[in-house]
Structures are given as structure tokens and as C-alpha cells.
Amino acid sequence: MAARKRKARAMAAGGAALWRRLSAWLPQGRLGLAALLGRLSDRLSRGRDRRSRRSSWLLLAPLLTPPVPVITAPPCSLCPEGAHRFQWISNLVPEFGISSSHVKVLSSPAEFYELLKVQIKAAKQRVVMASLYLGTGLLEQELVYCLEETLEKSLQAKGSPDLRVSILLDYTRGSRGRKNSRTMLIPLLQRFPEQVRVSLFHTPNLRGLLRLLIPERFNETIGLQHIKVYLFDDNVILSGANLSDLYFTNRQDRYVLLRDSPEIADFFTELVDAIGDVSLQLQQDDTVQMMEGMVHPYQGDKVAYCEIANRRVMEVINSARTRQELLHAKTFHSNQPGSILSQQGSQESGSLKPEPDTWIYPLIQMKPFGIQIDEMVTETLLTEAERGARIYLTTGYFNLTQAYMDLILGTRAEYRILLASPEVNGFFGAKGVAGAIPAAYVYIEQQFYSEVCYLQQQERVQLQEYSRAGWTFHAKGLWLYLAGSDLPCLTLIGSPNFGYRSVHRDLEAQVAIVTENKALQQQLHQEQEQLYLCSGVVSTSTFEQPNRYVKLWVKLVTPLIKNFF
């Protein structure tokens, strides 16, 4: 009975969401009313013909996504069709074509930490680091020493120093406690004031009486800067890991290095600069202030602030997209036989880059600023996955949005969802209320598993729990295997957890990596296998274990607070 009520509520909510999105679509002229209703009728008819118990509105998922921005510059009519089936993502974000030889998948926290130090020491032009926070332990202090050493070398070089360091953190998390991210970085600001910038993003949703009443730590539930990107000159590391000792030792995450990728490095530098411009600037005396003329995030007008932030970020995305389209057109025409550009290129063949076999798409999600690109792409990927395709999806905090859950339960692909067992949850053993968070995740997991069983989808949708003694689990992302393929052709890697916070509250970024190269596909496959090897399949008996007992008060409170963690 309870399951039927949940299903009815989901159908009602889905119907309401559908009509909200349709009403948003119609005025924009994307589809004529007749055509739109025709598509609606066709999909409903197909839904009625199916014998499964899925609600028919789930089949309307392509209509539920917000409209794709109109491409202002028409594509070159001479250019061939897309090299791969995911090239539609370039309608939303810039497409960076690179050689697969420039991509390296890392596997361990120690490897990630050592790479950070090596890259910092080798940097000549720029170091850009965006993270939730910087820890205060010995390993983090060593990173700061590496930055100091590299900046000192730059300062002593002949002429003006070229190296610039830009660090973006979250204000609330980075200000927690007496010794915090700010106190760790102030010495760099004092020693190298012209070369170092530290920006602290403060969500515009934490303001007024709410800001005064919510205590430290709890104020982090309202919204955070959650992007994790680390770049050094033209090398970029994308990850879900923060700059903290746990993430350098025994907290499992994902990490990918993009070597010699100047266009991608430029994009993320501009993105971090844009967020930094609308963030509080850390001063040498541990005070903060906004850039001159910028609206304050919690003292100024909220609507005006969010509009400015939206404009700054979208300028970065759209300008990069335009540059990449022009570069693509130039490259295509230069490769045409007999063209002047082709003749010039043959004379300079030594400088030509190899043909790209891998494409990088940056996916940005900043719902407070009205930017929902990552959500749109993720929903479309889940919607379009055909029968026989396999999606391996992992999150350290299993709290999927209703839209993602409905798509997983209502589409045709096979899903293997990897999540943290209670013992490897990052909140396991925490003091106070936070100590009950793992139990809340168990309850959410149990509810979802019950829905899978009710719909008789246990073979198609499988849950697996990561378990590893002495470790915690923080990996997130997905791998997509097309029907009939033993290797993934696409992965998502970055900061989003696929939950309500990632979609609605925090600033997030990840990349879609699409590759045709078998060696890189094998790297991604091995990464997936390595993570899933440390897991066990969830069954009904899983929730009968003593450590899965969820107290009544946790069950009652979880629906009220699940959107905050």
C-alpha cells in the first residue's frame, strides 16, 4: 500500500513537472503546439501499449528537460556529421577534441597527492585550484610549502614574476574553526600579494536572519562551492576529491589528468575567475571584501547578485563554445585537399596536432544562478540509453533526485549503482546529529530498493555497496557502455553526487569524456572494475543485518532533511 502511494505521488509530481516544463517551452517557439501535442500523444500511446507497470509520463523524459540554448552560429554546411553520438552536448557547452594519449586515469589518493605536488613544483605560468576547502594537517601544509617554494622561484626569476596562483574555496567550510583554510593561506597572501588570489564563495541563499541563527557546520547545508578542479599551466586534474589529508590517504575518489590541454585549462581558469569575481576576497589580515562595484552575496540584492553571477559564468561558457566552433571550422577547412590552409599545413606538418579521438565537455550546474547544464545532460543520457546498454553509476552519498530515480526506474538500460556501505560513509562515527546521517542514507537506500523490487526491476537495476576496511568512499560519476560493448565510451567525472544538493544548492562541475580510443576505454573500464570489486550486491537480507537498523526518529526526520545532505 505504501509503495502504491509513493508511486501515485511520483506520477502526480511528474505530471505537474511535465506541464511546468511544457508551459516554459511553448512561448519560446521551440515546437509548435500541434507538433508538441503530437509528440505527447505518440509517447502516451506507446506508454499504454507497454505491459510494464511503469508510469507513462516517464517515457516523456526528453520533453521534461529544459530547452537547449539556440545555436547562434549555424554549423558549417561542409562539415561532416558528428564523429560520435554524443556530439549533441556541444549545443550546450564547448567541445574540446584531444588525443587520448593526453588522458591519464589515476586510481589512488596517494597517487593524486603526489601528482598535486609534482604539478605545483613544475608550474611556470598558473596554478588554479578550486575545492570545497583546504585542510589543516601536515599533508595540506606540505602543499602550501610547495606553493610557497614555486612562488619564491618565480619571484627570483629575472624580470617580473609570471606565476599566478588562484584558489577558490567555500566561505562557510573554509572558515570553520579557529585554524582553517583561511589561516593556512594567509601567509601566501602576505608574502606574495601580487601573485596570489584567494576567493571564498558565499551562497546567496544564506542571508538575513537565517545566517544569524544557523550555527557553524549547519550553515554549510544551505549551499556550497563544491567544484573540484586543479590545474597547472596546461595540465588539468578533474576529481571529486577535496584538498584534505583523508583524500590523500584513505578516502577513495576518482581522478583524471588531462595533459597539455591549453584550451581546457583556459576554460577552467576563466570559470574559476568568474566565480572568484562574485566571491569574497580573502585579505592579509583575515578579513574579506568584495571586488569594487560587485553586489554582495548576502548583504546586497539577491536577484541582482544571481543575475550578475549567471552572466559572468555564461559568458565563459558561450565564449569558449564560440572559440571551439571557430577552431573546428578552421581545422576542417584546413584539412580539405587543395585548400590554401591545407598546403600551408603540409609545409608545417611537424607542428600539427594528432587527430582527436577523445572529446571533453565541461558540464556546469549552478542552480542558484539559474544554470542547469549538468542536470540537462545527465537526464538526457539516462533517457536515451537504449536497451542492452549498461550504466555504472557511483556516488558516495546515495540520495538521488526524484527525476534521476524515475529515469533509472522507467528507462531500458541496465544499471549498476555503487554506493557507500554505512561503515565507509564519510559521516560514520561523527559526533552529534551528523552521526545519524549514515543511518539516514541506509533508509533512503532501503526505500529505493523497495521500489525496485515492487517494479520487479531487480535484474535490470542493481545496487552494490562499497566496503573496505579502514577506508571511506567518496567516488562519484558514471560509465556508459553501449549495447554490445565490453568497454565504456563515455564517463562523467567531477564533483556532482546526483543528489538534491548537487542539482539545487551547490556549485558543481564535471566533465563528460567521450572516447573512441580502445586504450583509454580500457583505462576507464579498469577504473570502474577496481571500484566495483570492493563491493557486494544489495539484497533484501542486507537490510536485515543489525548494523542496518534505522531508529524511528531517523525515519521520521529523513524526509524533512534529505534535501540538505
Image (cartoon, grey):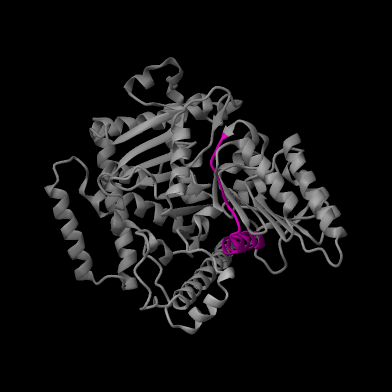
**The one of 246 and 95 positioned closer to us in this rendering:** 95
Q: Is residue 377 left or right of residue 10?
A: right
User: Residue 111 in the image: x percent, y percent?
Assistant: 63, 39
Q: Is residue 513 left or right of residue 143?
A: left
User: Residue 278 in the image: x percent, y percent?
Assistant: 64, 61
Identify whether 273 is placed above or below 148. Answer: below
Q: Quadrant of the N terminus?
A: top left
Q: Where does the magenta region start and end? A: 252-278
User: Residue 390 in the image: x percent, y percent?
Assistant: 33, 42
Q: Is residue 266 left or right of residue 45?
A: right
**539 inside magenta stretch:** no
All told, the count of numbered labels is 0
Residue 495 visible in image: yes
Specify the quadrant of the image occupied by residue 558. top left
Residue 507 visible in image: no
Residue at 66% in and 63% down: 277
User: Residue 374 in the image: x percent, y percent?
Assistant: 45, 55
Identify whether 43 is placed above or below 390. Answer: below
Identify whether 469 is placed above or below 10. Answer: above
**The one of 228 and 67 positioned closer to us in this rendering:** 228
**The one of 365 and 96 positioned closer to us in this rendering:** 96
Q: Is residue 472 left or right of residue 63?
A: right
Which residue is situated farthest in the left direction here? 49
